[in-house]
Amino acid sequence: MLAALYLHPDRERTLTELAEVAGVSAPTISRDVERLTTAGFLTARVSGRNRYVRVDRQHPLFSPMADVLRYSYGPLALLPGVLGPLRGVERAFIYGSWAMRYQGELGSDPNDIDVLIVGDLERSDVYDAASAATAMLGRETNIRSVTRDAWAESDDLFLRTVRERALVEIPLAMPS
């Protein structure tokens, strides 16, 4: 929920949208939003039957909170917006050290984000997406693309290794 709000600070969200993003019930989100609004982290308005919330950019902790959330949840919150619009993307995954830490494996802090795209893409689109992701996440983002057939085959050592280790699928269609 916080990543959805802080990493897209200009977007208002309904409580229903936030519950979908966070994968929790509406009453849970309602309680959390009430606490955050009372503390001044969020602003809220009511229109009809909906309550809309967004972060308060004027709160003194806005920037530090956004930095922490971008660092920890940024790849899964921001990469769908970078990769989803690309023509030819069928699936996308984060692999490597970031995926290992996300899945709870101990180790040093990841220096970069490794992304694998399955589909038929133009090389220039992959390069542009990697540049955009690096700028948004504040960490080097390395994107490699493979065809659907290459992903399905098991004889490529690199792809076999990627499939056998920590792998986090990037949701290409985020709740609106």
Image (cartoon, rainbow, N blue to C red):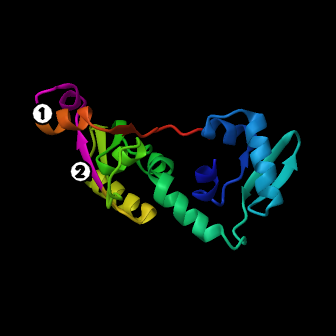
- Kindly identify the amino acid type of the residue bearing the numbered disc 2: Arg
Residue 110 picture location, percent across and down: 34, 57
Q: Quadrant of the C terminus?
A: top right
Task: Provide the residue span drawn in magenta.
Answer: 142-155
**Disc number lying in front (2 or 1):** 1
Name the residue located 22 percent from the left edge and 34 percent from the top edge.
Answer: 147
Name the residue located 22 percent from the left edge and 31 percent from the top edge.
Answer: 151
Q: Left or right: 153 with respect to 75?
A: left
- Kindly identify the amino acid type of the residue bearing the numbered disc 1: Asp
Tags 2 and 1 in contact by the CB under 8 Å rule? no
Residue 6 forms part of the magenta stretch: no
Residue 69 picture location, percent across and down: 54, 58
Distance of mark 2 from mark 1, alpha carbons?
20 Å
Of residues 119 and 161, which is closer to you in this image?
Answer: 161
Residue 149 forms part of the magenta stretch: yes
Density class for disc 1 (Cα within 10 Å; few <14, some 14-19, many ≥20) is few
Residue 60 picture location, percent across and down: 69, 74
Pointer 2 or 1: first along the chain: 2
In what element is the residue under mark 2?
A: helix
Indicate which disc residue 123 carries.
2
Q: Left or right: 37 with respect to 132?
A: right
In what element is the residue under mark 1?
A: loop
Q: Left or right: 153 with respect to 99?
A: left
Indicate which disc residue 156 carries.
1
